[in-house]
Image (spheres, rainbow, N blue to C red):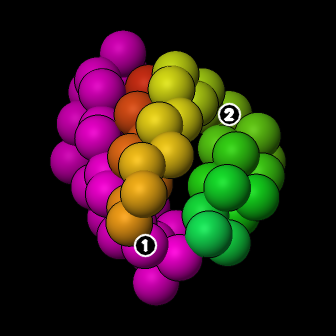
Amino acid sequence: MPVIRLSEAIAKVREGGIIQMTATDPGVLHDIPAWCKVHGHKVIEIDEKTDEIILIVEKQ
């Protein structure tokens, strides 16, 4: 589901726009960077907290 949420959010911002998302599923550590690579976007930051993962993605 996080990839779908990111896809929907990134469609609403202009190139250079920043999306911050929070997830609890550790699968996002692989899925989001892979999705960004395929779609040409950039993962700016990944912050792994105790109970959540915060990802910052830039639309390219």
Residue type at mark 1: give it.
Thr
Magenta segment, which residues? 1-25
Tell which of 57 and 16 is nearer to you.
Answer: 57
Residue type at mark 2: give it.
Gly
Task: Tell me, yes or no, whether the two marked residues, 2 and 1, touch with CB atoms within 8 Å.
Answer: no
Mark 1 surroundings within 10 Å by alpha-carbon count, few (fewer than 14), some (14 through 19), many (20 or more): some
Q: Any magenta on residue 59?
A: no
Q: Which quadrant of the figure has residue 8?
A: bottom left
For the residues labelled 2 and 1, the Cα–Cα distance comes to: 24 Å
Q: At 52% from the left edge and 22% from the top edge, which residue is drawn?
A: 44
Q: At 30% from the left edge and 38% from the top edge, which residue is drawn?
A: 19
Q: Which residue is mark 2?
A: 40
Tell which of 46 and 1 is nearer to you.
Answer: 46
User: Which one is earlier in the sequence, the residue at label 2 or at label 1?
Assistant: 1
Is residue 6 visible to us here?
A: no
Judged from the image, the secondary structure of the residue bearing numbered disc 2 is loop
Q: Which quadrant of the figure has residue 20?
A: top left
Q: Which residue is mark 1?
A: 24
Tell which of 53 and 44 is nearer to you.
Answer: 53
Q: Which quadrant of the figure has residue 9?
A: bottom left
Q: At 68% from the left edge and 33% from the top edge, which residue is drawn?
A: 40
The correct choice, above or below, for 44 with respect to 3 in the image is above
The correct choice, above or below, for 2 with respect to 56 in the image is below
Q: Any magenta on residue 23?
A: yes
Q: Position of residue 4 (x, y in %)?
A: 45, 75
Q: Position of residue 60 (x, y in %)?
A: 52, 23
Mark 2 surroundings within 10 Å by alpha-carbon count, few (fewer than 14), some (14 through 19), many (20 or more): few
